[in-house]
Image (cartoon, rainbow, N blue to C red):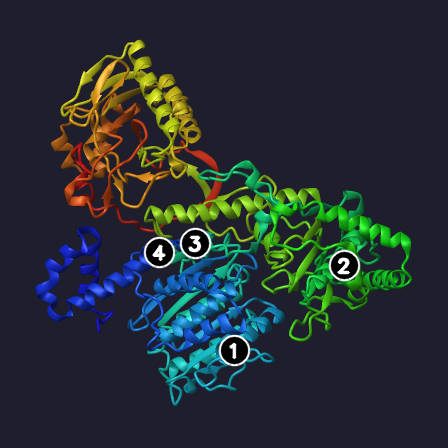
Amino acid sequence: MLSVLDDLFPVFADWARKQGLDEAKRRFGRALGDDLDAYVAEYERRIAVIESDDPPVLHGPSDPWYPGPNEAVDVYWPALRTHFTTALGWPDERVRPVDRASSKVVAYTPHPARPTWTSKGLVVGYVQSGKTTNFTSVIAKAADAGYKLVIVLSGIHNGLRRQTQERLDEQLHELRPTSWLMLTDRADDFRPPKIQSTALLHGQESKVALCVAKKNARVLARLDAWLEDASKRRILADLPVLVIDDEADQASVATTTINPLIRKILAKLPRCTYIGYTATPFANVLIDPAADDLYPEDFILNLPRPDGYFGTERVFGRDAVEGDEANGTDLDGFDMVRFIDDSELDKLRPAGKKAEARFEPEITESLEAATRWFWLATAARRARGDDEHSTMLVHTSMKIAVHESFKEPLIDLRDSTVAKLRSRDPVLLRQLRSQWEDETGRIPRDELPELPDTSFGELLEHLTEVVAGTRVVLDNCRSEDRLDYSGEPQVAIAVGGNTLSRGLTLEGLVVSYFVRAAKAYDTLLQMARWFGFRPGYEDLPRIWMTGQLESWFRHLATVEHEIRLDIDRYEQQGLSPREFGVRIRTHPVLRITAKMGHAQPAYASYGGRRIQTRFFPESDTTWLRDNLTAADTLIRDARADGAVGESMPGGGRLFRDVDADIVERFLGSYRTHADSPDLDSRLVSAYIHKQRTVGSLDRWSVAVMGADDDKHGTVRLGGHDFGRITRAKLRGTGPDRADIKTLMSKDHRVVDLPITAQQARAMNESELMGARNTDPVARDRGLLLLYPIDPHSQPDPRNVRTRAPLDAGDEVIGMALVFPGNAEEKTRVTSSYVSVDLSALAVEEPEEAEYASLRGEDEG
């Protein structure tokens, strides 16, 4: 079997990706001999992981090694998958995405057979969307692959740690009790010497050790001391370790106690993979990447949104963003939010610290309506045959005294409602019927046609029992009567603060009453526990909140969506987390996170840069025709302003001394693909405006990079006919996003300078830019290049494995811009985003060979 330590395999795989598998077999066949078939099979398994569409992942240079489960030898994952399908009754279409996503996570961890490594990654999910299921599956597959110790860091509260421990006991330990060495249990956090460190290897070689530890300073200090003992005994040197950090943005980032302890633990593990899991990655992607910290430098993976997931977009809708394909009606969300009037707020939470001591809450009109709806919706679930847990969340303050003050008023409301129901009070029944009919009319039946209609009469049969059986539970760090879903199904109104705001799943959540005005993205999203799955009652959840909070959550839904689009886009562009920081849209009132780390404004600085079109919606004839018109108008306006075109060697025409106003008008009408944010005309124009105030970029050179013959047809621009060039698209792209990858050749950047193409090809990056910046004319002048592209460009025969014919519905006009100056200049345009500062990291420039095939006009 192929050894993962074989240095030849990366060379073979790289050759196969670039030149084709047949060529790789021809090239390496003699050297590999009988091992060739194993190399080919291994390459095909790995490339299947790379090319998987679901889910996207940003990753560094390492190739994925894990091709998926091996049914012949694996034991942990097959047992878990059987549990999903039999005990939980999941259909194949639900198990399959879990299988694919967890395999992709494992594939980008280091192979456990490597001698030493440290790897740090991040998995981004949705709130209450199955992150625990994913990391449970990752643990099972990692155990099958050879990892021997798994440490799960599970939140900062006992409730979440216990819930995670119970889940892993049920889905891992109890399925293979003789294969796991459990270092913690439901009742007890990590407490050595209950389990001696030597047990990990001595006499337990066939087992995988599993620990679920709370992110608490004392607990982590005990774990660190235990590992220190193991290190002294030289047990850790040969021990592949997987660390799962659940709720990785909480406590793990920018804290004075927990963060150093986690880093100290990781430093003791010479063969360690750290994976953070979170739905709110804001703090994680803003960690200083140059420090010895937890920045996810090796990979960032987006978990797909599961079918049936009920999240922020469903409730609040969102705004359209760059690259969106949804229309306006798809962005509105369901009519599930009910507003709390500002006049009620002082009755729901104390107005300042002085009011805390004497605060007495009231059951306001909105709180009573929310509670009654909770009972109606729960009774409707019972009428539909759903007897599972049902929960209402009341979250008005983080103060424990406020939680305690709500208990008696809510109990009184419950008891008085039960008495009225038992006496069939006509006023109450009319109010309840009216509320039921009004609320059910807010969600049109065609939105959720698979759900049954439930009449008021049907739910009324269950209503008294539901109300009478309701528990009012205080769940905070001081309360003893905590939420516990391990027993019989319960109906509960949970009043709480921070213990309900992180990771802990509120089973069967139907109603959220939410007025706490936190002002950070991550805090808001984590406090709102109504997300997740609502099978059979997707029409019933409701949220009561202020109008301001509702607008904030719509903004957050937009931010979430945009972050995932960015990760998808960066993956498509082959960028790693060390090369491009994930952008986060800002808000005029909200902070992104309290832990802004190495955040900096995401500036658009074009000094010394070249930007070019890469993506085309080849099926959008209107889009293509508009760009043709914009290019034609540009050349006509330049000629009318006195610019005289001069022929260029190799074809094309150069117009010098073009007024910047003409260029800006063109940029305002030329359309760029949403996946090219650097070409945003607003940012480019803003930069040009700033430069013009200091006497730069007032004049431009405009070049049409036509071919010197008409074998691919011609295009007429500004009264001149230009031969088309060819740019085939990457195979598998289009029609809405045909990717030609690179438009410019190296020598095109200096077509307005007295430098031949041959001379330019011999120059390096700094020499090319230096030539522009030292030229007495070009140093203050921009260069705009137009490329008339054959809409049916055929690939070069040498590239048919990776390229396909362009199939555009109209003429394709590519565009590129070359700016004088340098990237460090002070004239920058601040966009409405922040990202991590990656300036301290060394990023390799593309090899010169990358441009070798792009020097000719007809390269595919």
User: Mark 2 and mark 1: span between their CA atoms?
Assistant: 56 Å
Q: Name the residue type under label 2.
A: Glu
- Horizontal side, residue 535 vs residue 268: left or right: right
Mark 2 to mark 4: distance in Å? 48 Å
For label 1, the crowd category at 10 Å Cα-Cα, with few meaning under 14, some 14 to 19 and many 20 or more, is some
Given the current orientation, which residue lies at the most extreme left position?
Answer: 30
Looking at marks 2 and 3 on the same chain, the residue that comes earlier in the sequence is marked by: 3
Q: Residue furthest bottom?
A: 203
Q: Is residue 659 left or right of residue 456?
A: left
Q: Secondary structure at mark 3?
A: loop
Measured as percent of width and height from the top left, residue 395 is found at: 71, 57
**521 w.r.t. 702: above or below:** below
Q: Earlier in the sequence, mark 4 or mark 1?
A: 4
| Label 3 sits on residue | 288
Q: Are marks 2 and 3 in contact (CB under 8 Å)?
A: no
Q: Whole-Å distance between the Cαs marked 3 and 1?
A: 27 Å
Amino acid identity at mark 4? Ser
Q: Position of residue 143 (x, y in %)?
A: 39, 75
The quarter in which the N terminus is drawn is bottom left
Residue corresponding to mark 2? 458
In what quadrant of the picture does the C terminus appear? top left
User: Which image quadrant is residue 656 in?
Assistant: top left
Amino acid type at mark 1: Arg
Instruction: Work out how far the residue at label 2 is from the one at label 3, CA to CA, in angstroms.
Output: 58 Å
- Give the numbered dot on residue 52: 4
Disc 3/disc 4 C-alpha distance (Å): 30 Å
The reply to whether residue 112 is visible in this rendering is: yes
- Residue type indicated by callout 3: Asp
